[in-house]
Image: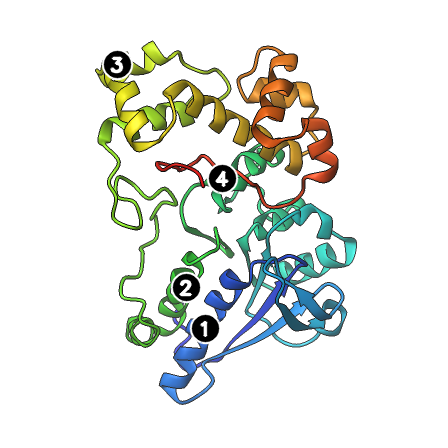
């Protein structure tokens, strides 16, 4: 981004119903801190939604918003869509028209959490790199093959900026401040918010070897899981994985029992089913296509395993299940509650 010297940066944050409140507020707050520390409005923002009024977040809290139709005039430097569950429900001709108008004016367009889905559906990410929350990466890749989907925390790509959400939204905003107002203000805002380390561009969503609370998964477990994640559609056998990481099957079973609380076979099956659930609830792929994409040769076996893991059939889940997942296996190195 280009340093705008003393200019004021004008932002619109467009939220959709069930947006993630923490990600949205986390994105806004560094700009508030920067203004306070500068003693002037270096950044101005307005929260809008498709229909205006009170918009309810996924945690049940609400934000008062201005309607999209009321903000068509005036200069905008950046428009960021903050969406979470079922972003496809909020695509509309008025929204896409507004996005294209802003794009034509040179406005930077962005997405938080699943906001990139709306940009992609509008055709505004074609040939670009973008990121979404890791739960939705598979669906994004399947739905929009013309978008290069990254597992990075945030991506800046020539007027298109995206972030996976959560606490990464703070880092995302601080990088915007750095790019538009310089290092000194970004560092000051980070200190003011007690954000002691700003993660760099290129930082990945996967936590690496160390867990956030300090627990450490053995390197062999991480390598085995990485191979599983890289081979979901055509699963490897456990002996093949053991050969690749130079470990006996008995040793791998012992490590998984201790650190994952599941056998390697069950863990592998569960992450394939987690991928399947994302495709079932977030795309219109046929259930046969989903079963194949998730490494199940038999649709009967797939449906049985799906029901066992999630408590309902994939067909019923497609109708009822566009809600936060009850289970999540990737990245997971702990026993599920």
Instruction: Give SS at disc 3.
Output: helix
Q: Which mark is residue 149?
A: 4
The alpha-carbon separation of the residues under discs 2 and 1 comes to 8 Å
Q: To which residue does mark 1 refer? A: 29
- How many residues crowd mark 2 within 10 Å: few (<14), some (14–19), many (20+)? many
Q: Earlier in the sequence, mark 1 or mark 3?
A: 1
Q: Earlier in the sequence, mark 3 or mark 2?
A: 2
Whether residues under marks 2 and 1 lie with C-beta atoms below 8 angstroms apart, the answer is yes
The alpha-carbon separation of the residues under discs 4 and 2 comes to 21 Å
Q: In the picture provided, is 158 more to the left or to the right than 89?
A: left
Q: Which mark is residue 170?
A: 2
- How many residues crowd mark 4 within 10 Å: few (<14), some (14–19), many (20+)? some
Q: Residue at x 42, y 41 (%)?
A: 151
Q: Earlier in the sequence, mark 4 or mark 1?
A: 1
Q: Position of residue 16 (x, y in %)?
A: 66, 59
Pick the quarter of the image with the C terminus.
Answer: top left
Mark 4 or mark 1: which is in front?
Answer: 1
Q: Position of residue 35 (x, y in %)?
A: 42, 82
The alpha-carbon separation of the residues under discs 3 and 2 comes to 43 Å
Q: Is residue 186 visible?
A: yes
Q: Earlier in the sequence, mark 4 or mark 2?
A: 4
Mark 1 or mark 3: which is in front?
Answer: 3
Q: Is residue 90 above or below residue 282?
A: below
Q: Residue furthest front?
A: 337
Q: In the picture provided, is 209 more to the left or to the right than 29?
A: left
Q: Is residue 304 above or below residue 10?
A: above
């Amino acid at each position: 981004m280009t340093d705008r010297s003393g200019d004021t940066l004008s932002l619109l944050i467009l939220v959709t119903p069930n947006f993630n409140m923490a990600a949205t507020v986390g994105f806004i707050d560094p700009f508030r801190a920067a203004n306070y520390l500068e003693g002037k409005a270096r950044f101005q923002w307005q929260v809008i939604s498709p229909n205006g009024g009170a918009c309810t977040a996924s945690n049940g809290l609400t934000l008062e918003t201005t309607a999209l139709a009321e903000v068509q005039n005036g200069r905008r430097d950046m428009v960021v869509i903050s969406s979470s569950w079922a972003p496809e429900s909020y695509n509309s001709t008025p929204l896409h028209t507004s996005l294209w108008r802003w794009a034509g004016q040179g406005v930077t367009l962005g997405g938080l959490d699943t906001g990139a889905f709306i940009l992609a559906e509008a055709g505004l990410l074609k040939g670009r790199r973008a990121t979404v929350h890791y739960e939705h990466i598979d669906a994004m890749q399947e739905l929009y093959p013309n978008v290069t989907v990254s597992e990075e925390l945030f991506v800046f790509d020539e007027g298109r900026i995206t972030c996976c959400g959560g606490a990464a939204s703070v880092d995302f905003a601080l990088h915007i401040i750095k790019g538009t107002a310089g290092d000194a203000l970004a560092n000051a805002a980070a200190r003011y918010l007690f954000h002691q380390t700003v993660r760099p561009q290129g930082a990945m969503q996967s936590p690496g070897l160390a867990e956030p609370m300090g627990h450490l998964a053995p390197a062999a477990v991480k390598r085995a899981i990485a191979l599983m994640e890289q081979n979901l559609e055509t699963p490897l056998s456990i002996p093949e994985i053991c050969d690749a990481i130079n470990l006996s099957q008995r040793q791998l079973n012992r490590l998984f029992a201790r650190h994952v609380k599941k056998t390697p076979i069950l863990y592998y099956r569960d992450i394939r089913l987690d991928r399947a659930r994302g495709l079932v609830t977030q795309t219109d792929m046929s259930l046969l296509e989903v079963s194949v994409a998730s490494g199940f040769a038999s649709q009967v076996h797939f449906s049985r395993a799906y029901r066992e893991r999630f408590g309902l059939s994939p067909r019923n889940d497609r109708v009822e299940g566009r809600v936060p997942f009850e289970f999540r296996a990737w990245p997971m190195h702990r026993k599920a509650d």
